[in-house]
Amino acid sequence: MTTELEKTGIQRDEKGRIVKGSGSLNPSGRTKGVSAYIKENTNDLHEVLDKVIEMLRNPADKQELQFAINYLTDRSIGRPKIYQEIETNTDIVLLLPEDIEQQDL
């Protein structure tokens, strides 16, 4: 048995869950933000990538070359994972109810 909410047109089952295919809770979709604006105005970021590739091929200095290398590798193969060893000197103590004194609160 399903019930339909008049305002949204979304069908729900007897437990209140949305029935598959009945509609969306967000019919207008995700709001467009800065990233969507940049993609729309840079030919889906192709212009940005072309500029970085140009910087890679004809760098003004070593800093620009390093930036281009890092930018392209970070976005194509991903940043390297950083692993850090953590040393702890924690002793595990087992407290039994008879070991704990009752305190007046």
Image (cartoon, rainbow, N blue to C red):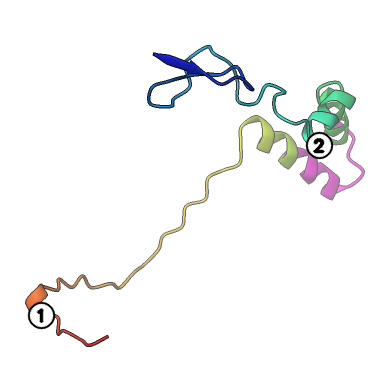
Specify the farthest residue to the bottom: 104
In this rendered view, identify the residue nearer to me: 65 or 11.
11
Q: Position of residue 14 (x, y in %)?
A: 38, 22
**Quarter occupied by the C terminus:** bottom left
Structural crowding at the residue carrying mark 1, measured as other residues with C-alpha within 10 Å and reported as few (<14), some (14–19) or many (≥20): few
Task: Answer whether labels 1 and 2 touch (C-beta < 8 Å).
Answer: no
Q: Which quarter of the figure has residue 92?
A: bottom left
Q: Position of residue 88 (x, y in %)?
A: 34, 69
Specify the farthest residue to the right: 60
Residue at the disc numbered 1:
99
In percent of the image, x 75 and y 31: which residue is there? 31
Above or below: residue 96 compared with residue 71: below
Above or below: residue 100 compared with residue 66: below
* Magenta stretch, overall SS: helix
Q: Position of 91 compared to 26: left or right?
A: left
Q: Which quarter of the figure has residue 50?
A: top right
Q: Is residue 42 visible?
A: no
Structural crowding at the residue carrying mark 2, measured as other residues with C-alpha within 10 Å and reported as few (<14), some (14–19) or many (≥20): few
**Magenta highlight on residue 42:** no
In this rendered view, identify the residue nearer to me: 78 or 54.
78
In percent of the image, x 54 and y 13: which residue is there? 22
Secondary structure at badge 2 equals helix
Which residues are drawn in magenta? 57-69
Residue at the disc numbered 2:
34
